[in-house]
Amino acid sequence: MVDTRFFPGAHKYWHNGKLYDWDSHIVHVMAHVVHYGSSVFEGIRAYDTDAGPAIFRLQDHLKRFEHSAHTLNMKMPYSIEEITDAIKLVMKENRLRNAYVRPNLFYAYGNLGLVPKASPVELTVGCWDWGAYLGEEGLENGVHVLMLPWRRIHHTQIDMHAKLGGIYVQSNIGATFARQHGFDEGVFLNLEGRIAEGPGENIIIVKNGALYTNDVTESILPGITRTTILELAKDLGMETHIQPITVEAFLDADEVFFTGTAAEVTPITRVTDARDRNQRPEEWKTYTIGTGKPGPITRQLAARYADVVRGKIPEYREKWLTFVYKDAEEARQYLKDVDVERVTKF
Ligand SMILES: Cc1ncc(COP(=O)(O)O)c(C=O)c1O
């Protein structure tokens, strides 16, 4: 049996057109991806609505998936429609109401030269009920982040619009370093010394009622949640600006928050500065953002986002939600008696 503590509700996954028990392992240890991180993936969420679970901005995620595959010279073995159907099928098979959905395309077993000329491209889809990425407590009361001593990989080095598996090793190192020192999450600066992003999150700051965030030219993955929040903010009449964020502007902001599919809208309320590699942790300085509590604009946008993803606001429901079941009745039939425990922090 594999340990499913961190995958609540996961019973089946999909691999190249078939469903498998979560317990079965079918990737060879000599698969190209295991050695070189030659994969592309998406992180997508589905939320329960009055018509059953709906996947948020699925088509935008799959467009990015296709772009990522292209970046790694992969031929997509399945069409967007087929992947959409596979995701719905896995959601149904696992009888999930809320889910994190993870499609992954990778170079499988064939050869181990750097050019995967004999390694086929394979697709898996898994989903499980993943609670708040930075914890319910962080979502509600804000997180304490560490400005990391390593600079984010630069946008001139790789196409940062793509979610490439191997690139995430830097996120892994940064996120682990922050947690090992007792922080909730890390923040990378870019090579220019300005704010880039979190290991799996974008950053938005609020000053005098306006929102400011950076873009790909500041070495970030331009996230789908980030554009969602910018659009919601504009629709609420807020001013938004895309421009570089200096460390000074970040520390001096009225409010700061992370955006991401996993992290949703998570307030950042404290920042510790570990930029200088020569400093020992006792020498790191800590700063409070604004009042030290999640601010009113962060709260307003987080609440709006929570409503939008759950289909409570008609104009966005049409535009951004893909329903897993035909209608509320079909969802009710499939999902009666389902109650899945959630993990709250990874
Ligand atoms: C490095 C990085 N930045 C930002 C994001 C946020 O992107 P999105 O809002 O599309 O999930 C993610 C998550 O996908 C990420 O991995």
Image (cartoon, rainbow, N blue to C red):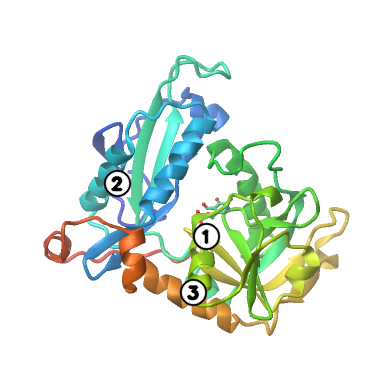
Identified at 45% across, 46% down, the residue is 42
In the image, what residue type sits under mark 3? Ala
| Along the viewing direction, whichever of 82 and 133 lies nearer the viewer | 82
Name the spot of residue 124 as percent of width and height, x first: 36, 37
Q: CA distance from mark 3 to mark 2?
A: 26 Å
Identified at 63% across, 63% down, the residue is 203
In the image, what residue type sits under mark 1? Thr
Who comes first in sequence, dot 1 or dot 3?
A: 1
User: Label 1's element?
Assistant: helix
Picture layout, residue 149 above or below residue 210: above
In the image, what residue type sits under mark 2? Ile
**Mark 1 Cβ and ligand 1 under 8 Å apart:** yes
Picture layout, residue 144 above or below residue 157: below
The disc at residue 87 is 2
Identified at 47% across, 33% down, the residue is 69
User: Label 3's element?
Assistant: helix
User: Label 2's element?
Assistant: helix
Mark 3 lies on residue: 302
- Observer-side mark, 1 or 2, equals 1
Number of residue marks: 3
Dot 1 alpha-carbon crowd within 10 angstroms: few under 14, some 14 to 19, many 20 or more: few
Q: CA distance from mark 1 to mark 3?
A: 14 Å
Identified at 33% across, 39% down, the residue is 80
Name the spot of residue 193 as percent of width and height, x first: 80, 54
- Observer-side mark, 1 or 3, equals 1
Mark 1 lies on residue: 227
The disc at residue 50 is none
Name the spot of residue 14 as percent of width and height, x first: 29, 39
